[in-house]
Every structure is written in structure tokens, then in C-alpha cells.
Amino acid sequence: MKYKAYYRPQSVPETVELLASLEGPVVLFAGGTDILIYAREDDRYADSSIVNIFGLPELQGITLLDDEIRIGAGVTHTEIEQSPIIQKYAKVLADACRTIGSLQIRDHATIAGNICNASPAADSLAALAILDAKIEYLHEGKPCELPLVDLIAKPYKTVLTDRDLVTCIRIRRLPEGTQTVFYKLGRRKALAISRMTIALLAHRAADGTVDDFNITVGATFPKPYTFPEINGILLGKKPDPARIAEIAQAISAKIPEIAGIRKSTTFKQPVCRNMTARLLNELFTEA
Ligand SMILES: Cc1cc2nc3c(=O)[nH]c(=O)nc-3n(C[C@H](O)[C@H](O)[C@H](O)COP(=O)(O)OP(=O)(O)OC[C@H]3O[C@@H](n4cnc5c(N)ncnc54)[C@H](O)[C@@H]3O)c2cc1C
């Protein structure tokens, strides 16, 4: 990998100071599992200063807050997958991270790297979107925050500058009894780039009405989206086959609406409609 200079700061304050002092393009290097693939393709980092932030102590840890969970930017997919906090209060994210790459990749690749690389096929994004993820970052040393859906602008592009350091991600802490599903469709079972993901969460009140519902589709749109109007089809109502079919139809109709009609649309639209209906039917029948 060709680069101009390489730095390994030991803390976030040291990183902020370093970033302010550097001239020219900067690349924040976490697990490196995306960056090293790009570096193999060409010399795009030849003029860049590489700042290795992997393992910075302030970017570690998963903490349970009152209504939220705080995940350090440098937490790996393996740590998320194995976290008792995530498994109990945001299982959909553990299930999503478990599908990423191989064990070796998950041991090293970080959640902020998955977000900031902004690949439309990134597997954590649909789960993070339905958990209302908010991204905290330092811009010129000042704390800022954006919802995930606003942080990612388009494929492989966030609104962050090359010197903005993501410090943590906050997600909803789901109430007990919330059911979640993460489904990944790839060309094979392991080490597969997603063709489509579906993430959903649902909670039912004692009388059977749905009082919390959020569903989205990943690896399908240019960036993560949530659909409050589609969630509204079930909210406050009892799930039945007609409402489930309506949701499946509505979410699959978003594919041409948002992504335009492409070669893959004829494949993705029916898969999305049928899988959504199947997952919701299974979920509500099991419950
Ligand atoms: C063999 C292989 C299989 C893979 N399989 C999958 C898969 O199944 N699903 C999937 O979603 N991904 C997959 N990936 C992609 C990759 O592993 C993930 O996107 C990973 O989460 C990236 O994290 P990282 O820490 O390695 O990021 P890096 O490569 O270090 O960085 C990626 C980008 O994020 C930026 N960045 C990282 N941390 C921060 C921060 N704290 N603040 C600001 N910017 C930051 C970097 O500057 C860079 O632009 C795979 C990769 C490989 C090589």
C-alpha cells in the first residue's frame, strides 16, 4: 500500500490534535478490511496520511444506557455479535453482524468502518436503521451527531470530511418482548456480498395490537432508508394476512421508486415482497 505518511496516535485527544496538524488528504484506518482492498486496486492513498485508530481506548465498549445502547466506533462485529447487551436489547444487530464476511474479518472489522465505507451492501446498515442509529463524531474536535440515514449521502459517500472521527453509535434499547428478524440473501451462505437484507422489529401489546414496528430493506437502495408510512400499516392494529400483504407490497414498491428500474428489479421486487410476507407471517404465527 502506497501512502505519504503513517501515524498511530494513542488516544482520541492525540488523534484530534494530529488531524488538525496534518496537511493534504487523510485516511482514518480502523480494521482496514475495506481500505486494504481498495489499496490493492490502485495507488489512491499515495498522497494521503494514514492515521491508524484501531484499538483507541475511547472507541471501545458497549454500554447500556436508560433508553439506548452506546457502541464505541472501534467495536468489532465479533464483539457486537457476542455482546450480551446487544443480544438482549438489540438482537437484530447481533444477527446482522454475524453474517459479515468470515470470522477473521469480523474479529478485526469495526462497526464505524462498515458505516463510513457506506457500501449499499453493508450488512449492519438495515439493522442500524430500524434501531434509529445516531452517529456521534468529532468535527474539528467538536462533538456532533447525525442519524445514520442522514450521515450516508449516497453509495460509498458520507457527509463526513476526511478528518471527522466517528466516536460512537447510539441505538435504541428495545423493550422486553420485542421480536426482531434479520434476513440476508446472498449468492452463497458464507463470505457473501448481500443481494438483499431485510431487518424488522415488532412489539405487541397485551391485547395483540402492534405498538412498535419498523421494517427496512438493505443492499437494495443507494443508502439506508426507513419508511414510517409503511410501519403505520401495522401500528395500532392487529397483524392479519391482509395487512402483512399490504406491507410486503408497499416495501417492494419502494425498489423501483427509490433505486429506479434496473436489471435486478425484476428479481429483487418479487423476492422482497415474498420474503417480507414470509418473515412477517412466521414472526406473528410464532408469537
Ligand atoms: C473478505 C471480506 C469480506 C467482507 N464481507 C462483508 C460482508 O459480508 N458484509 C459487509 O457488510 N462487509 C463486508 N466486508 C467489508 C468490511 O469488512 C466492512 O465494511 C468492515 O466493517 C469495515 O470496517 P473496518 O474497520 O475494517 O474499516 P476500514 O477499512 O478501516 O475503514 C473503512 C472506511 O471507514 C472509515 N472509518 C473507519 N473508522 C472510522 C471512524 N471511527 N471515523 C471515521 N471514519 C472511519 C475509513 O476512513 C474508511 O473510509 C468484507 C470485507 C472483506 C475484505
Image (cartoon, rainbow, N blue to C red):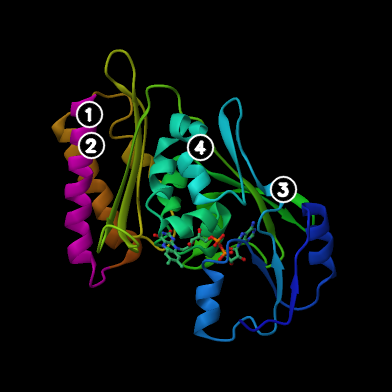
Secondary structure of the residue carrying tag 1 is helix
> Looking at the rendered structure, which numbered label has been put on residue 60?
none
User: Residue 3 lies in what quarter of the image?
Assistant: bottom right
How far apart marks 4 and 2 lie (CA) works out to 26 Å
Q: Residue 122 appears at what percent x and percent y?
A: 43, 59
How far apart marks 1 and 2 lie (CA) works out to 6 Å
For residue 60, above or below residue 243: below
- In screen coordinates, is 72 left or right of 231? right
Q: Residue 183 appears at what percent x and percent y?
A: 29, 47
- Name the quadrant of the N terminus: bottom right
**Nearest-to-viewer mark from 4 and 2:** 4
Residue that badge 1 annotates? 284
Residue that badge 4 annotates? 83
- Name the quadrant of the C terminus: top left
Residue under the point 72% across and 65% down: 163
**Camera-side residue: 287 or 231?**
287
> Looking at the rendered structure, which numbered label has been put on residue 57?
3
For residue 263, above or below residue 186: below
> Looking at the rendered structure, which numbered label has been put on residue 280?
2
Residue under the point 17% across and 41% down: 278
Magenta region includes residue 268: yes
